[in-house]
Amino acid sequence: MRTATLTRPLAVLTALLALIVCVTVPAARADSRIVLERGHTDAFYVVIKDGVPEVLVANVRDYYTPDDTVFRIQASTYSAEHELMGPFDGPAEGYSSVALENGWFEPGWSAPGFHDVFESLRVDFTQVTGPGRALIVGNSPLDEEGEENGARAAFLADGTYDVIPGSSLPILGHTHAHWFFTHAGEYQLTGHAVGTKADGQEVTSKPFTVTFRVERNEQDTRGAAPAQPSTEPSTTPEPTTPPAVEPSTAPSTQPGTSPTAGPSAPSASVFDTNEPYRLTQGHVDLFSVVAHNGALVMAAKDESTGKMVVRQPEDVTVVVSENTRRDFSGQVASTLVSSGYFLPESGQNQQEAPFPGWDSFSAEPEFPAVDLQFVDVTGPGRVFLFSTARRGLSSQLVSGSYELNDGEVIRMSSPSHVHTNWLFEKPGTYTMTVRTTGVSSETGQTVTSQPATYTWVVGETAPEPTPSATPSSTATAGTATEPTAAPSDLPTGAPAPSSTADAEPTSASSDQPMGAATPGSTTTAGSAGVPSATGNPSATPSATGNPSATPSATTSGAARPPVGGGAVGGGDLGGGSGAGGPGLARTGAETMTLIGLSLAILTGGSAFLAARRREA
């Protein structure tokens, strides 16, 4: 009778622990998926690890395994009258990422440094499921005559918009686009990255799955749409590797009755190098606002080398070559100029020409809004800034003008990352002296940076200074140089994303706030600024801008992976705070902890009951 008495509790204990493992562990994994809904995000952030592409999700300062994340498209993005000429003949009903009421969330794609290994890179989609259609669209580009005809730009290889099994997305550089979903519900996109070498050999990554969760708006009274057709992927998607990304900054301010501080002096610790650099192509956040020790600093975040390098504006010469010259007719000719040197907001030619923009993610959280003030603009001709995010031309300047003159202001009322169309009327050398102003959320004072001068050489070659592909070894604290050893599980591929080599969406939303990851609800982003040598993303939000409820766990800000192997580095540009650590492996580790704990309890309980039975 004694043996039976002891055996019964053992069986009960075993059953209970089995129930815990079977029920609690899957629930823990589901609960710990990172929900991303704001800020600079790359849904397809491709690094090269041991010669093989690997797909991560990059958000703010963190990297995640795609399968462990969910992109939340808020209900406020719904409308029955979205303008999407091209994929639709008339008003389109559904949910568009560009319509986010407060903030900016348009997941993009990037693969810094991939040209070191591959001639070309693409993402092939093998399986797509969801309650409706999932589309990738851009702004309306100018046609050959310089006319904005309303048809949205397409990014998929076949010139279509719908992401379906068999779709292919070429990665030409750092790009962001608008996502459109016809119905609310959960969409899953499964695929893999494919790199093509110079000899034609293709190298394929492990499969990955990204999930978009589109929240239903109460005004959407439609029934469910038929599920999107899909095909089975050849293998089961697996997670990739660790995370961490880059910092973020902020937007615009009106000097009012708040006290005013004198111009803040630039700090050497903000910059990775002080060598002259001739920028002829690639993504650059030319007017980057950085908060450092309570001061504001103008910088240039350059990704043209395949790594993130924070440069002093005076060290950079932006070269706009003769092959960017084009003739216009139609609206551009009648409103602006009939010919000139043109850099499109889409960034589609960023492998051959500069793709300049501006961002303020490295100024937050202390400066939630900033203005860019153009103190002096000189050159042989006029300079125009304009967007085609909506029908017709739209201005990026507070004055509503298209022409960039002395005294013009670009306002960022929340952390933003923006690209726009640039048009220079004549060849020659242009200079732009720019300063930034913002109100400190800590002191209430209006802070103004020292003015910085940017130089453009248009339609001719610039002098040939010795470029620095990597940050100077003399960079001081706050810049992030490469540590001697890196976590073994971090990808060795490319740097983290920049803000928005966004083909049009960037300019579409000029007031873009910071973003944050969050498990279950939305976790705040980790810290760490823009690491100099590791190719950090150029614009990324900081820990404060995290909308949403308090996360159940805080994502860590692991160091970002460097390009082409090597150590991982992390630095700080003055934005955000948070603990460092491997963020990618966290969800799996939590699951293993639960399993280990359950097994330990089971083993201990079994040993105890067995001992009692022997005594009996």
Image: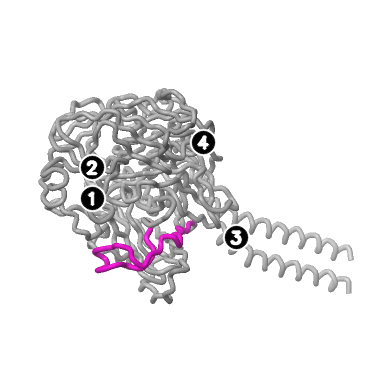
Residue 93 at x, y = what percent?
35, 68
Badge 3: few (under 14), some or many (20 or more) residues near its Cα, within 10 Å?
Answer: some
Q: CA distance from mark 4 to mark 1?
A: 35 Å
Q: Mark 3 and 1 residues: CB-CB less than 8 Å, in contact? A: no
Q: Compare marks 3 and 1 and give the one earlier in the sequence.
A: 3
Identify the disc placed on residue 28.
Answer: 3
Quadrant (top left/top right/bottom left/bottom right) for the N terminus: bottom right
Report if residue 80 lies within the magenta region.
yes
Q: Nearer the viewer, residue 24 or 50?
A: 24
Q: Compare marks 1 and 2 and give the one earlier in the sequence.
A: 1
The residue to which callout 4 is attached is 441
Display coloring: one colour
Q: Nearer the viewer, residue 60 or 408?
A: 408
Report if residue 87 lies within the magenta region.
yes
Query: Measured along the vertical axis of the image, is residue 9 above or below residue 417?
Result: below
SS under mark 4: loop
Q: Mark 1 and 2 residues: CB-CB less than 8 Å, in contact? A: yes
Q: Nearer the viewer, residue 211 or 360?
A: 360
Position of 137 compared to 612: left or right?
left
The residue to which callout 2 is attached is 402
Residue 5 at x, y = what percent?
85, 72
Q: CA distance from mark 3 to mark 1?
A: 49 Å
Position of 268 compared to 322: left or right?
right
The residue to which callout 1 is attached is 393
Q: Residue at x 36, y 30 (%)?
A: 471
Q: Compare marks 4 and 1 and give the one earlier in the sequence.
A: 1
Q: Nearer the viewer, residue 166 or 507?
A: 507
Q: Which residues are magenta?
A: 69-97
Q: Amino acid at mark 4?
A: Ser
Q: Amino acid at mark 3?
A: Ala
